[in-house]
Image (tube, rainbow, N blue to C red):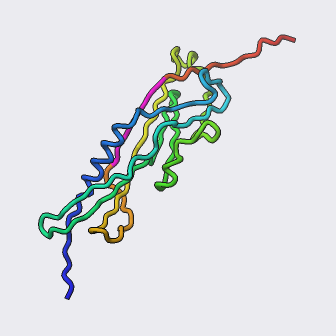
Amino acid sequence: MYQLVCSDLPEPSVWDELASAIEALPPPVWEASPPEPGITGLETWLWHSGNTDAGPISVSYTDGVTGRSFTLEGRAWVGTITWETGDGETVRVDALSHASGLTIGGTEEQPAATHTYETSSAEAGESAGYTVALDLTWVGEWRWREGSGPWTAYQPMLSTATASNTGQYEVVQIVSDLQP
């Protein structure tokens, strides 16, 4: 005869550990090409050059009722990157899995996102440059095993964490002075 015992696994404790690891990371960094100043009408490439993953982090747990020991493991990654470009536009990139979350930030050679400014920052009344905001939304997943048994499949975390950074990006308009 089998006896089914349900243990309330403390998934939030794994997320708390991951959230602490995320908070300990350096602030997110956004980059653009062309480097400042940007040029109106020219596609600006955007990427995030900071961390995009945290973990895995393990937490051990012994059920107070049954005395059974469990290990919980969690990992987190940037699930969404959003750039507020400062000219009223928003550019968003989503990672659908842990694997795609590892490369979501892009690189200078393969940017995560692009945006074309149509107006110079000075013309838009932004003399110091457009205020660009980078927002990262971290997501995660966890799995568990009893003792040294097999791991369960990863399950999504119900919690998220965010990290943000803002900076100025000057955009200029280049006009030809050539006269016939």
Q: Is residue 167 left or right of residue 32?
A: left
Q: Is residue 64 left or right of residue 39?
A: left
Q: Identify whether 49 is placed above or below 153.
A: above
| Residue 121 % position (x, y) | 56, 20
Q: Identify whether 141 is placed above or below 18.
A: below
Where the N terminus falls, by quadrant?
A: bottom left
Farthest residue, direction front: 148
Quadrant for residue 106, please give it: top right
| Residue 109 % position (x, y) | 64, 39
Residue placed at 34% from the left, 62% from the top?
A: 143
Residue placed at 14% from the left, 70% from the top?
A: 66
Number of numbered discs overlaid on the protein picture: 0
Residue placed at 47% from the left, 56% from the top?
A: 97
Farthest residue, direction bottom: 1
Where the C terminus falls, by quadrant?
A: top right
Quadrant for residue 39, please give it: top right
Farthest residue, direction left: 65
Q: Main secondary structure of the magenta part?
A: strand
What residue range appears in magenta? 160-167
| Residue 120 % position (x, y) | 60, 20
Quadrant for residue 141, please give it: bottom left
Residue placed at 52% from the left, 36% from the top?
A: 49
